[in-house]
Amino acid sequence: MQELIGTCKCCNKKIYCLDGFYNGVVTDEKENYCFECYEKRKAEAPCSAPTSAGGAAGEVGL
Ligand SMILES: [Zn+2]
């Protein structure tokens, strides 16, 4: 039994729920991605943590 959940926001591939197993990823923004695009997306934006607002262990470049 497979149920269409949505389409990948990146490549428009259809994402199904297969026997309770979701064949993709839903982000916090409720956007659907297939695993491939989700991995790519992670690689392109590895870390979105703010670097400003000086901390004690802040890195200093140059
Ligand atoms: Zn995709």
Image (cartoon, rainbow, N blue to C red):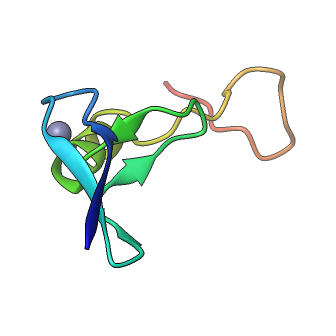
User: At which x and y percent is residue 5?
Assistant: 36, 46
- The quarter holding residue 43 reads top left
Query: Which residue is at 63% across, 38% downward?
Result: 59
For the N terminus, which image quadrant? bottom left
Is residue 19 visible in the rendered structure shown here?
yes
Q: Report the image quarter containing ligand 1.
A: top left
Query: Which residue is at 39% across, 52% downward?
Result: 25
User: At which x and y percent is residue 57?
Assistant: 77, 47
Q: Out of 25 and 54, give the one closest to the viewer.
A: 25
User: At which x and y percent is residue 4?
Assistant: 29, 49
Is residue 23 visible in the rendered structure shown here?
no
Residue 54 relative to residue 52: left or right: right
Q: Out of 15 and 47, give the one closest to the viewer.
A: 15
Q: Residue furthest bottom?
A: 19
User: At which x and y percent is residue 9?
Assistant: 28, 27
Location of residue 27 with respect to 62 vertically, above or below: below
So how many labels did they put on this image? 0
